[in-house]
Amino acid sequence: VENESGALSRVAGLFSARAYNIESLTVAPTEDPSVSRMTVVTVGSPEIVEQITKQLNKLV
């Protein structure tokens, strides 16, 4: 994700708006200071995980 104010809030908001739980969340820097790596762990059916992935890709 872009390393900017509100990026984490948008990702968390995507989960909370759909009542999905975040099991684990890690944010780390990358070689490009304008981009951060975000690792999100969740549990759900393959269909739910696919839907979450599509929504997250829209945020990137």
Image (cartoon, helix red, strand yellow):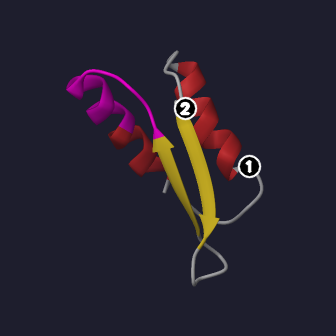
| Amino acid type of the residue tagged 1 in the rendering | Gly
Residue 45: quarter of image: top left
Q: Which residue is mark 2?
A: 14
Count of marks, rendered view: 2
Badge 1 marks a residue whose secondary structure is loop
Query: What residue occupies the far right of the structure in this picture?
Result: 5
Query: What residue occupies the far left of the structure in this picture?
Result: 46
Above-or-below relation of 32 to 2: below
> Looking at the image, which residue is at 55% across and 32% down?
14
> Looking at the image, which residue is at 33% across and 22% down?
44
Residue 51: quarter of image: top left
Badge 2 marks a residue whose secondary structure is helix
**Rendering coords of residue 52 (x, y %):** 38, 34
Compare residues 47 and 43 and report the one nearer the observer. Answer: 43
Give the residues in magenta: 41-52
Magenta stretch contains residue 57:
no
Above-or-below relation of 15 to 54: above
Magenta stretch contains residue 42:
yes
- Label at residue 6: 1
Query: What residue occupies the far top of the structure in this picture?
Result: 19
Q: Is residue 14 left or right of residue 56?
A: right
Above-or-below relation of 1 to 45: below
> Looking at the image, which residue is at 22% across and 27% down?
46
Q: Earlier in the sequence, mark 2 or mark 1?
A: 1
